[in-house]
Image (cartoon, rainbow, N blue to C red):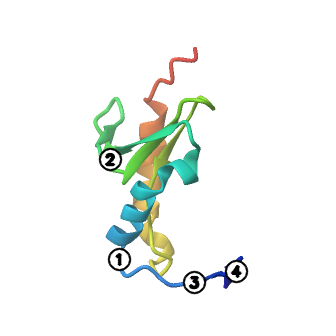
């Protein structure tokens, strides 16, 4: 529990990943910074065509950083994330940040 002045915040689980994703969309400025914006799901691919669809992208203009967003509930098996992680790591190789 978190208490701030007269308000109590009680930990409560999300009912679904869709609910968690919506909380991220609704609060991206708090999560990624006041100079950020959020882009919804979009397919990213490597040069050889391997692709994945993350839940979104957050871009912080002020900090010159970007984030690949994947909302996952904790009750998944650890192996549920491996195919996504491998594919997104490969896709990241093919993304240019324009810094070189």
**In-front residue for pair 93/3:** 3
Q: CA distance from mark 2 to mark 1?
A: 18 Å
Q: CA distance from mark 1 to mark 3?
A: 15 Å
Q: Which mark is residue 3?
A: 4
Q: CA distance from mark 4 to mark 3?
A: 11 Å
Vertical placement of residue 67 versus 71, above or below: above
Q: Earlier in the sequence, mark 4 or mark 3?
A: 4
Q: Are circles 2 and 1 on residues that touch, CB within 8 Å? A: no
Q: Determine whether the residue tagged by mark 1 lies in a helix, strand or loop.
A: loop
Tell me if mark 2 has few (under 14), some (14-19) or many (20+) residues whose alpha carbon lies within 10 angstroms of its own. few
Image spot of residue 31 (x, y percent):
56, 53
Q: Which residue is mark 2?
A: 40
Image spot of residue 88 (x, y percent):
43, 46
Select label 1 or label 3 by which is in front: 3
**In-front residue for pair 44/42:** 42
Image spot of residue 71 (x, y percent):
44, 63
Q: Earlier in the sequence, mark 2 or mark 1?
A: 1
Q: Earlier in the sequence, mark 3 or mark 2?
A: 3
Q: Which residue is mark 1?
A: 16
Q: Determine whether the residue tagged by mark 4 lies in a helix, strand or loop.
A: strand
Horizontal side of 10 relative to 77 (left or right) equals right
Q: Determine whether the residue tagged by mark 2 lies in a helix, strand or loop.
A: strand
Q: Earlier in the sequence, mark 1 or mark 4?
A: 4
Quarter of the view holding residue 44: top left
Select label 1 or label 4 by which is in front: 4
């Amino acid at each position: 529990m978190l208490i701030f002045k007269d308000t109590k915040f009680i930990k409560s689980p999300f009912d679904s990943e869709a609910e968690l994703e919506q909380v991220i969309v609704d609060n991206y400025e708090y999560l990624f910074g006041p100079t950020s914006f959020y882009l919804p799901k979009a397919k990213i691919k490597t040069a050889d065509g391997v692709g994945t669809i993350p839940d979104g992208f957050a871009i912080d203009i002020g900090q010159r950083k970007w984030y690949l967003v994947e909302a996952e509930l904790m009750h998944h098996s650890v192996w549920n994330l491996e195919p996504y992680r491998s594919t997104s790591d490969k896709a990241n190789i093919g993304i240019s940040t324009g810094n070189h």
